[in-house]
Image (cartoon, rainbow, N blue to C red):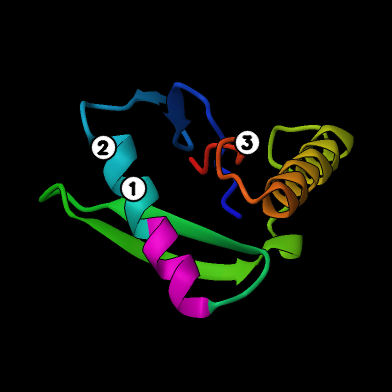
Amino acid sequence: MCLINDRSKAFTGLRAYDWAAGERTAAVELARKAAEKLRLPFVAVDVAQKQTGEWIVIECNDGQESGYAGCSPIKMWQNIVEIERVIDLAKHSGSRENFPPMM
């Protein structure tokens, strides 16, 4: 399962940053690959973009230690429960049609 904060802007310590075309996709893909290699059920992957435009992994942490950074803990856990419910229903129906988007 992959949960991504779906804000239209990334936030640095000083100002909001608008994603340039393809940046979000590249950052998410790198984080997804790192998480898959770790094979952990819940992981937070921090990525950064170098001045050259290349995305790198800064660190990986247990997702439980990532904090709730800007989202309601209750809403986050409700979303996780709902995603797991939909995945479970889809697995039992034999259809991938109802799988939630993994973005």
Q: Amino acid at mark 2?
A: Glu
Task: Please state the extent of the stretch shown in magenta in the rendering.
Answer: 31-38
- Check disc 3 and report its element: helix, strand or loop: loop
Q: Residue furthest right?
A: 74
Which residue sits at x=44%, y=36%? Answer: 12
Residue 89 or 103: which is nearer the viewer?
Answer: 89
> Is residue 90 toward the left or the right of residue 2 in the image?
right
- When the figure is inspected, residue 94 is found, relative to residue 9, above or below; the finding is below
- Specify few, some or many for label 2: CA neighbours under 10 Å numbering under 14, 14-19, or 20 or more: some
Spot occupied by residue 33 in the image (x, y as percentages of width and height):
38, 65
Q: Is residue 10 visible?
A: yes
Q: What secondary structure is the stretch in magenta mostly built from?
A: helix
Q: Is residue 15 visible?
A: no
Q: Which residue is mark 1?
A: 27
What residue is shown at x 68% (from left), y 46% (from top)? 90
Mark carried by residue 23: 2
Q: Position of residue 24 (x, y in %)?
A: 33, 37
**CB within 8 Å, label 3 to label 1:** no
Query: Secondary structure under badge 1?
Result: helix
